[in-house]
């Protein structure tokens, strides 16, 4: 089941289910947001699917028309953006067969490994513990709160002080924290984690700076478990809409050095991240980047992340934003 949020022409929020291979949206009656639906499922000790099946209405809309009108919303949000955490983990994906072979060769001499390679090796050796056991903790980063999340077809703004604006095609997991402080996973969505790779490559200690950017999630939320093998295509389209770079990418536990459960444990083990009512969007990492092939994306060009299992592609244009300098006042 693929859920999405959208706005009608009058600005009213609705949620719906994608049908007809993503071409149609069947409206769900009685819920104005995915958040409200999730809270109702928690209160009823039910599932999203059961509530949706009982609330599907007769209204069917054209997905392309909603998208063209700018009506798409992220598949999950919070009414107060400060109560939505956007975070992620890196060095979690194995990459292609050639990449794995090269990586293992680099991992041969532990004394000469960089900190990043040591972290990757730790994941390979301890990121998939047996059921009931705790594995090694991954790299972790903070991106921002809900104000940085963009929906499909919305621009991704690169601040003028950035040195780069590059895509990161990833799977993101979406959660709501229940009244008892327990995390409830709603499902998964395509994400463009979007980072400043040039800044990061100057020094790995700049990773935190490079991640403080907007991101895109959606358009749809895949309810249920993440497939063990997820295959998609990441593309850069020029200002005319022509593809100037594309590359397949994979995700899912078959292609990762950590289990989803291990990544979740090491995020939600902190009480700060189990505050009732909060929303969490957590990115799982990638092994495919256009910047690794020497591509620099220009404003006006479009990122496109296409995974058939997740419905319509996630598309966002790169835009250049002017960010006013902070004015510091003494009290």
Image: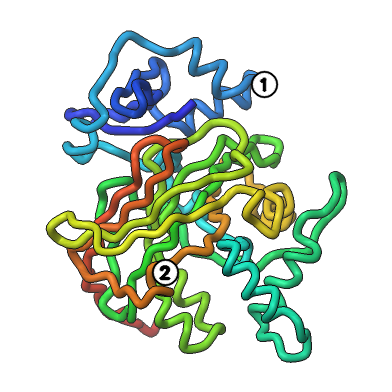
**Residue 46 point in image, percent of width and height:** 63, 20
Residue 195 is tagged as 2
> Please, which residue is most extreme toward the left here?
240
- Name the residue at 60% across, 61% down: 93
Residue 57 sits in which quadrant? Answer: top left
Label 1, residues with CA under 10 Å away: few <14, some 14-19, many ≥20: few
Locate residue 187 relative to residue 33 in the image: left or right.
right
Q: Would you say the residues marked 2 and 1 are in contact, meaning their CB atoms lie under 8 Å apart?
A: no
Which residue carries the number 1 mark? Answer: 45
Q: Is residue 211 above or below residue 20?
A: below
- Name the residue at 38% across, 25% down: 18
Residue 21 is tagged as none
Q: Secondary structure at mark 1?
A: loop
Q: Secondary structure at mark 2?
A: loop
Q: Is residue 185 above or below residue 128?
A: above
Residue situated in front as seen by the camera: 226 or 269: 226
User: Tag 1 or tag 2, which sits nearer the N-term?
Assistant: 1
Locate residue 322 relative to residue 176 in the image: left or right.
left
Residue 23 sits in which quadrant? Answer: top left
- Name the residue at 32% across, 53% down: 304
Q: Is residue 101 above or below residue 5?
A: below
Q: Nearer the viewer, mark 2 or mark 1?
A: 2
Locate residue 239 relative to residue 62 in the image: left or right.
left
Mark 2 to mark 1 CA distance (whole Å): 38 Å
Q: Is residue 83 above or below residue 211?
A: above
- Name the residue at 39% across, 35% down: 311
**Residue 92 point in image, percent of width and height:** 63, 62
Residue 42 sits in which quadrant? Answer: top right
**Residue 78 point in image, percent of width and height:** 45, 42
**Residue 86 point in image, percent of width and height:** 50, 56
Instruction: Name the quarter where the C terminus is drawn.
Output: bottom left
Residue situated in front as seen by the camera: 301 or 273: 301
């Amino acid at each position: 089941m693929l859920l999405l949020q959208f706005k009608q022409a009058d600005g009213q929020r609705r949620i719906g289910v994608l049908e007809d291979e993503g071409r149609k949206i069947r409206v769900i009656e009685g819920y104005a947001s995915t958040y409200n639906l999730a809270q109702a499922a928690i209160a009823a000790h039910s599932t999203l699917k059961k509530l949706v099946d009982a609330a599907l209405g007769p209204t069917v809309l054209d997905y392309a028309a909603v998208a063209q009108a700018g009506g798409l919303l992220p598949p999950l949000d919070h009414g107060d953006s400060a109560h939505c955490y956007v975070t992620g983990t890196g060095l979690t994906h194995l990459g292609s067969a050639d990449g794995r072979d090269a990586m293992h060769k680099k991992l041969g001499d532990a004394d000469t490994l960089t900190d990043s390679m040591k972290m990757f090796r730790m994941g390979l050796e301890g990121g998939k513990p047996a059921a009931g056991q705790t594995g090694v903790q991954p790299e972790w980063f903070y991106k921002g709160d809900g104000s940085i999340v963009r929906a499909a077809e919305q621009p991704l703004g690169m601040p003028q002080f950035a040195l780069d604006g590059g895509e990161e095609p990833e799977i993101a997991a979406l959660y709501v924290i229940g009244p008892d402080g327990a995390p409830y996973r709603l499902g998964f969505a395509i994400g463009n984690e979007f980072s400043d790779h040039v800044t990061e490559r100057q020094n790995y200690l700049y990773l935190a700076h490079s991640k403080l950017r907007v991101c895109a999630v959606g358009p749809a939320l895949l309810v249920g478990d993440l497939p063990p093998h997820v295959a998609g295509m990441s593309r850069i389209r020029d200002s005319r809409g022509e593809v100037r770079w594309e590359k397949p990418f994979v995700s899912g536990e078959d292609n990762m050095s950590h289990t989803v459960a291990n990544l979740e444990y090491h995020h939600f083990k902190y009480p700060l991240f189990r505050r009732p009512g909060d929303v969490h969007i957590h990115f799982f990492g990638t092994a495919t980047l256009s910047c690794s092939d020497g591509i620099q994306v220009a404003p006006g060009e479009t990122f496109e992340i296409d995974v058939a299992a997740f419905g319509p592609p996630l598309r966002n244009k790169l835009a250049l934003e002017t960010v006013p300098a902070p004015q510091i006042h003494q009290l």
